[in-house]
Image (spheres, rainbow, N blue to C red):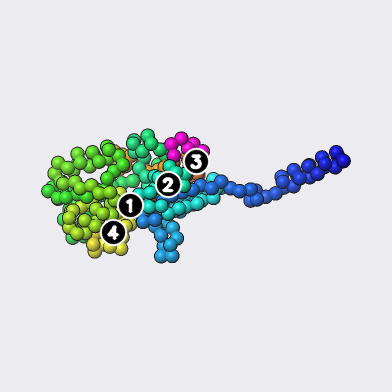
């Protein structure tokens, strides 16, 4: 009887060893992103999420063989969703600022952002002080105190700087003629307001990379101390960059590699 039990146990162990890995549940990475933030994250007419951040998130999950649960979460509720555990990470162009790095664990950068001016298509503003002097500039409130200070110190001595909770509100005032230019993330401005709207808006001035405003780049936000997912996301980002998958996705949206 004892030998029969031993043979049964050995048989079960052997059978388990032969089972394909697919029968074991994968880890699930819960990702949050704003559904109204084209081209990084937005919804198709049938309500499905898509965009640069959506594709990058799926590529990251594939690289480390975990399941992606990507959730549409409006910007206003994003940090609450992260802290409550509804999601594990925010992948949505969050700047790696000094203040944010003190409050959260961040992985990246996965984007090196640049900023430019958005102006009306018939505007004579070209980004120089001569064409900006005396005008009203709209900006999105930076999560970085250094960022807000940089804008005010750089432009505030010859322009009126108006802060907005969201860049879209600044653009609405640009359209209404209440501001003369908007200064914000170049990629967002181009895809959300210029592409397909060339008779209404254009970009002006040179592309600027401003660490004081954007931090050292944009990264993935996790709860403070979450080293499990931080470690896996670092590995995943390295893998998709080395494999060329990152560049493939980046060029499909922007025509260039956003890490270069």
Alpha carbon separation for disc pair 3 and 2: 16 Å
Quarter of the image with the N terminus in it: top right
Q: Which one is earlier in the sequence, the residue at label 2 or at label 1?
A: 2
Q: Which one is earlier in the sequence, the residue at label 4 or at label 1?
A: 1
Viewer-nearest of discs 2 and 1: 2
Alpha carbon separation for disc pair 3 and 1: 27 Å
In the rendered image, residue 80, in percent from the top left (x then y), is placed at: 40, 45
The answer to which quarter of the image holds residue 96 is top left
What residue is shown with label 2?
Answer: 81
Q: Are marks 3 and 1 in contact (CB under 8 Å)?
A: no
What residue is shown with label 1?
Answer: 187
Identify the residue at horizontal 43%, vertical 49% (top origin).
32
Identify the residue at horizontal 43%, vertical 62% (top origin).
47
Instruction: State which region is magenta.
Output: 223-229
**What is the crowding at mark 1: few (fewer than 14 residues within 10 Å), some, or many (at least 20)?**
some
Identify the residue at horizontal 28%, vertical 51% (top origin).
167
Alpha carbon separation for disc pair 4 and 1: 10 Å
Seen from this angle, which residue lies furthest right? 1
Identify the residue at horizontal 15%, vertical 46% (top origin).
159
What residue is shown with label 3?
Answer: 229
Alpha carbon separation for disc pair 2 and 1: 26 Å
The answer to which quarter of the image holds residue 121 is bottom left
Alpha carbon separation for disc pair 3 and 4: 36 Å
What residue is shown with label 4?
Answer: 194
Q: Looking at this view, is 208 or 140 the one in front?
A: 140
Helix or strand or loop: what does disc 1 sit on?
helix
In the rendered image, residue 166, in percent from the top left (x then y), is placed at: 29, 51
């Amino acid at each position: 009887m004892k030998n029969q039990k031993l043979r049964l146990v050995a048989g079960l162990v052997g059978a388990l060893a032969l089972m394909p890995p697919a029968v074991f549940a994968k880890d699930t990475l819960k990702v949050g992103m704003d559904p109204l933030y084209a081209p990084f994250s937005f919804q198709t007419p049938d309500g499905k999420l898509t965009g640069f951040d959506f594709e990058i998130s799926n590529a990251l999950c594939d690289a480390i063989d975990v399941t992606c649960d990507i959730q549409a979460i409006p910007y206003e509720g994003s940090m609450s969703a992260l802290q409550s555990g509804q999601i594990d990470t925010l992948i949505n162009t969050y700047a790696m600022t000094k203040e944010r790095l003190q409050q959260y664990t961040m992985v990246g950068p996965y984007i090196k952002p640049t900023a430019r001016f958005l102006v009306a298509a018939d505007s004579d503003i070209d980004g120089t002080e001569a064409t900006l002097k005396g005008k009203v500039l709209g900006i999105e409130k930076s999560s970085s105190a250094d960022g807000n200070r940089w804008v005010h110190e750089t432009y505030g001595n010859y322009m009126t700087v108006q802060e907005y909770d969201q860049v879209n509100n600044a653009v609405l005032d640009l359209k209404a003629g209440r501001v003369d230019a908007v200064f914000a993330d170049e990629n967002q401005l181009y895809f959300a307001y210029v592409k397909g709207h060339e008779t209404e808006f254009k970009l002006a001035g040179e592309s600027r990379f401003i660490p004081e405003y954007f931090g050292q780049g944009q990264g993935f936000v996790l709860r403070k101390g979450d080293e499990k997912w931080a470690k896996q996301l670092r590995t995943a980002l390295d893998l998709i960059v080395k494999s060329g998958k990152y560049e493939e996705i980046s060029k499909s949206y922007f025509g260039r590699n956003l890490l270069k």
